[in-house]
Image (cartoon, rainbow, N blue to C red):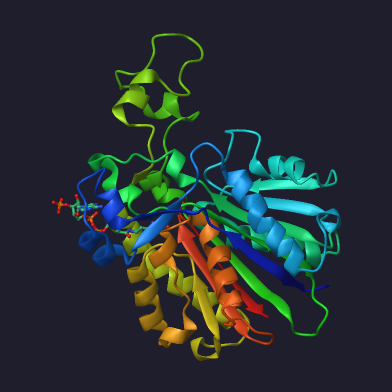
Amino acid sequence: MYSSKIAGIGHYVPKNVYTNNDLSRFMETSDEWIQERTGIKERRFADRYEETTTTMGIEAAKVAIERAGITKDDIDFIIFATLSPDYYFPGCGVLLQREMQMKEVGALDIRNQCSGFVYALSVADQFIKTGMYKNILVVGSEKHSFAMDFETRSRNVSVIFGDGAGAAVLQRATKEGQGILSTHLHSDGADAEILAMHYPGAHANKWLKDKPAFPDQELGGLFITADQIESGAALPYMDGPAVFKKAVVKFPEVINEALAANSYTAKDIDLLVPHQANLRISQYVQQLLGLPDDKVFNNIQKYGNTTAASVPIALSEAWEAGKVKEGDLICLAAFGSGFTWASALIKW
Ligand code: UT7
């Protein structure tokens, strides 16, 4: 079996910067509240008309492909992770394939929210290991700004999330002991609804039976109703404190699982790149693992939480800053909606 390695990593963030003070023009919030609770100072929002989840993913993909020293024609499989796709269906993978004029290779979309990129990496790793593909493009991209509500009623969600994209090219590792050592994937759907976008969706007849918006007709009409749009029910929903409580347990758990599986301990980590959910979560995990500041990479201060894009953006920035070097032990970890959580341990 072959190991896989990340041969190239890249990212793209839109140029529109919105500071916390900018958001307080739209809703009752403050720079002080946001920084104290989340560590976020500013985030990027995509151009409303010109940029989409796919176009940002393409920009990140171009960088990753160039850094891998290959061309788009060498890519033999595409995996695209996002919760904010251009279309409800088809997924962004095929749109990227079309816009980049790639060969008619397979394209798979992954819907695992904040842990989407680590899940995607794990899937790519299996295909490389079996020898089925040689150059897999893995993308995580989000355009949250198009579906968020910038009124006070949604302030616990809309001050946290930002737009952006990251991408990686996976190839067979050439050196013994190099590459992705292991990946670890988990889920628990018991609390699926506490961090979710409930509408539009096919669940309506299960959850809406007693609701006044339930239309009086035999078939159809349940995907989304005008009432749901008007009342704000078709907006992302998050019970922040409940998510926080679970995240601070599952992050360290899945990191330790990856370390134990490879006979390492936390002190062996050269860089931990956690999903950028909340600076307070990262700091708590850092403290629990006993890691010094320079071994944990955080950039949530600049970009907010970019969900499936956050791990590859952070990894790409860390690589650019010289914090990811050959031979380093890198740990990626993520937790989010589902709940799903995951980790990957990489010998770079
Ligand atoms: O990517 C993975 C998914 N997401 C996460 O991991 C997020 C995990 N959760 C969190 O990061 C935190 O729970 C939040 C940052 C979302 C919220 O922080 P919190 O300390 O848990 O605040 P809270 O939701 O308990 O709200 C405390 C107060 C409330 O007011 P009252 O009821 O005490 O009067 C909120 O209405 O803060 C209020 N509030 C705000 N105030 C100013 C909520 N959002 C805001 C806001 N600005 N943006």
Residue 261 place in picture, x, y as percent: 61, 79
Q: Nearer the viewer, residue 4 or 157?
A: 157
Q: Is residue 68 above or below residue 151?
A: below
Quadrant location of the N terminus?
bottom right
Residue 125 visible from this viewpoint: no
Q: Which quarter holds ligand 1?
A: bottom left
Tell me which residue sits at (72%, 41%) in the image.
94
Residue lying furthest bottom: 267
Which image quadrant is residue 74 in? bottom right
Indicate whether 18 appears above or below 260.
above
Q: Tell me the residue at 39%/76% (across/down).
A: 285
**Residue 257 pos. (x, y %):** 54, 76
Question: Residue 165 location, x and y as percent?
Answer: 57, 55
Q: In the picture provided, is 87 more to the left or to the right than 247?
A: right
The image quarter in which residue 227 lies: top left
Which sits in the foreground, 223 or 68?
68
328 w.r.t. 167: above or below: below
Counting labels gives: 0
Left or right for 140, reference 96: left
Q: Tell me the residue at 53%/88% (across/down).
A: 265
- Between 191 and 128, the one nearer to me in the picture: 128
**Quarter of the view holding residue 211:** top left
**Horizontal arrangement in the rendering, residue 105 relative to residue 266 (left or right):** right
Q: Position of residue 106 (x, y in %)?
A: 79, 46
Residue 124 visible in the shown view: yes
In the rendered view of the protein, which quadrant contains the C terminus?
Answer: bottom right
Q: Residue at x 56, y 71 (%)?
A: 317
